[in-house]
Image (cartoon, helix red, strand yellow):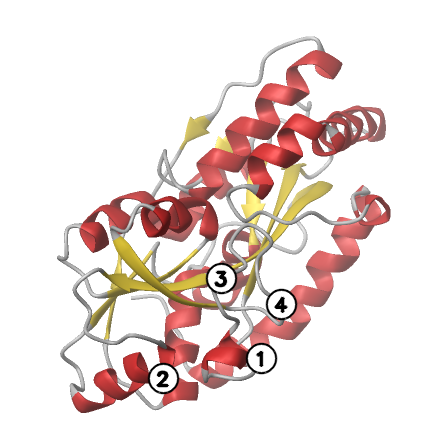
Amino acid sequence: MVVPFAAGGAADTLARTIADRMRAPLGQPIIIENVTSASGSVGTGRVARAAPDGYTLGYGTMGTHVINGAVLSLPYDVARDFQPIALMSNTPLLIVARKAMPAKDLEELIAWLKANPDKASMATSGVAAPSYLAGALFQQKSGARFGLVPYRGSAPALQDLIAGRIDMMIDPPVSSLPPVREGHIKAYAVTAKSRLAAAPDIPTVDEAGLPGFHVLNWTALFAPKGTPDAVVTKLNAAVVDALVDPAVRVTLAGFGFEFFPREQQTPEALAAFHKADIERWWPIIKAAGIKAE
């Protein structure tokens, strides 16, 4: 399973948890290979070029399979060069900042950013990653100006945030919740309409003063285009089996991951969901003027 992001981040955590549980129904282990760079497009491209035999799988997200298609010049087509296997998770993001940030809540954070235009920095997990798109939209909706700093993944970005070398992030809970709980960074809001079950004390953006700033990042498993139907069916069954495992759900829910209902875990449901997300986000990305650098 190619994970196109750095080890230790949100993508890596979910991928390893699911892959470990898929071992039993498949009768063999799944090896995780972290292939980073270019907002996940390098690793995703490797999956597109792989033999369609079911032995190379790709961990996909809104970033790799929607945003990259709008902002990068790719040697593959995000809409047509992959075989959908199954949707895995749907996760809002957290607006977090370094521990020494003077703002006590989101409204104060926005006020501080406006009072210090172009002085603050927001880490992202890559140019055109969901966190980058979220940062650009945050500027539009809040009227604040700050620098967007792309990293190779959320794990190294979070390290700099904890160390105080960067000011803010809009990051998946799987990686940002632990340092929030340990008091290493501050959490201001969750980018969803409802609070996280794993962190009910953190307000939503609507409650905190930035209504409508909803950004959800989904994850899914893909195979190369042309993978046989029988192989797709077997792989889908293994993913679904992993997602209903109580231990897996408890582990991932503790990091803020939420799950799609069973009827949305089919290959057909992923294909429809993927198409709809492209149709939703590509016009927004174009309007925001987000381009790869």
Classify mark 2: helix, strand or loop: helix
- How dense is the environment of label 1, judged by Cα within 10 Å: few (below 14), some, or many (20 and up)? few
Q: Amino acid at mark 4?
A: Ser
Q: Amino acid at mark 1?
A: Pro
Q: Disc number at residue 283?
A: 1
Residue at figure coordinates x 65%, y 39% from the top left: 222
Classify mark 1: helix, strand or loop: helix
Left or right side of 258 for 39: left
Q: Disc number at residue 107?
A: 2
- How dense is the environment of label 3, judged by Cα within 10 Å: few (below 14), some, or many (20 and up)? few
**Residue topped by disc 3:** 201
Q: Nearer the viewer, mark 3 or mark 4?
A: 3
Question: Which circle's residue, 3 or 2, is located before the other in the chain?
Answer: 2
Q: Nearer the viewer, mark 2 or mark 1?
A: 2
What is the distance, in whole Å, between disc 3 and disc 1 at their CAs?
Answer: 34 Å
Q: Disc number at residue 194?
A: 4
